[in-house]
Amino acid sequence: MYDPLLAAVKEATDCGIRESGIDVRLCDIGAAIEEVMESHSVEINGKEYDVKCCRNLNGHSIAPYQIHAGKSVPIVRGGETTRMEEGEFYAIETFGSTGKGYVHEDLECSHYMKNYDVGHVPLRMPRAKQLLGVIDRNFGTLAFCRRFLDRIGETKYLVALKNLCDNGIIAPYPPLVDIPGSYVAQYEHTIMLRPTCKEVLTRGDDY
């Protein structure tokens, strides 16, 4: 039932990978992705939907221990004219929706990540200081979820975690949703721009 939506989004991601390369403008990739994604319509539970790009989501450059490294790869037209450069890594990811194509934060947050550029922030709460040490030792600036903290034996940490978020040290990443009743799919690959080719680092037998 959902296979046509998955196929549309996969095709859009494959298009983004094809269009990527050294000296390519990010806005041109976004325009190509949108054209492919929004050429699709799907039928789910007997109802016809046009597939829309989630216009406020995008791919991004990646650096060591920095998931979002500064450059955004749009999935709609009208993005930045910044160009890709040799040696860069990118997450090429597309999101297709049967809703409005615009997501917002909702529901309980379970995923977090330490802000890469955060300097020393004085903390008055001892438990927050202790929890920050645990996060630094186990996750650094990579994303983690509350289940990971549970697995390493942390308990009663929610107030301290909120304190770290309130102080701008940790960024919360709540679930993102489109309108109720809509369906959203996502496909993603990580690529590296080598001097003579682009390598899809995450390609496997399953995708």
Image (tube, rainbow, N blue to C red):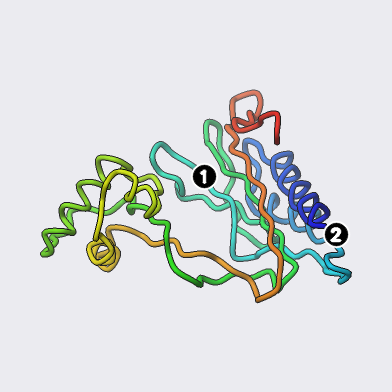
State which quarter of the image contains the C terminus. top right
In this picture, residue 78 sits left or right of residue 43: left
Q: Identify which residue is drawn at 16% across, 52% down.
A: 130
Q: Of residues 166 and 6, which is closer to you in this image?
A: 6
Marks 1, 2: nearer the viewer: 2
Name of the residue lying farthest toward the bottom:
180
Q: Of residues 176 and 24, which is closer to you in this image?
A: 176
- The three-letter code of the residue at mark 2 reads Ser
Q: Residues within 10 Å of mark 2 (few under 14, many from 20)?
A: few
Compute the Cα span from label 1 to label 2.
27 Å
For residue 179, which numbered disc appears in the image?
A: none
Q: Secondary structure at mark 1?
A: strand
Q: Position of residue 36 (x, y in %)?
A: 81, 54
Residue holding disc 1: 61
- The three-letter code of the residue at mark 1 reads Ser
Q: Identify which residue is drawn at 11% across, 59% down.
A: 126
Contact flag, marks 1 and 2 (Cβ < 8 Å): no
In this picture, residue 183 sits left or right of residue 175: right
State which quarter of the image contains the N terminus. bottom right
In this picture, residue 21 sits left or right of residue 37: left
Q: Of residues 80 and 205, which is closer to you in this image?
A: 205
For residue 39, which numbered disc appears in the image?
A: 2
Q: Secondary structure at mark 2?
A: loop
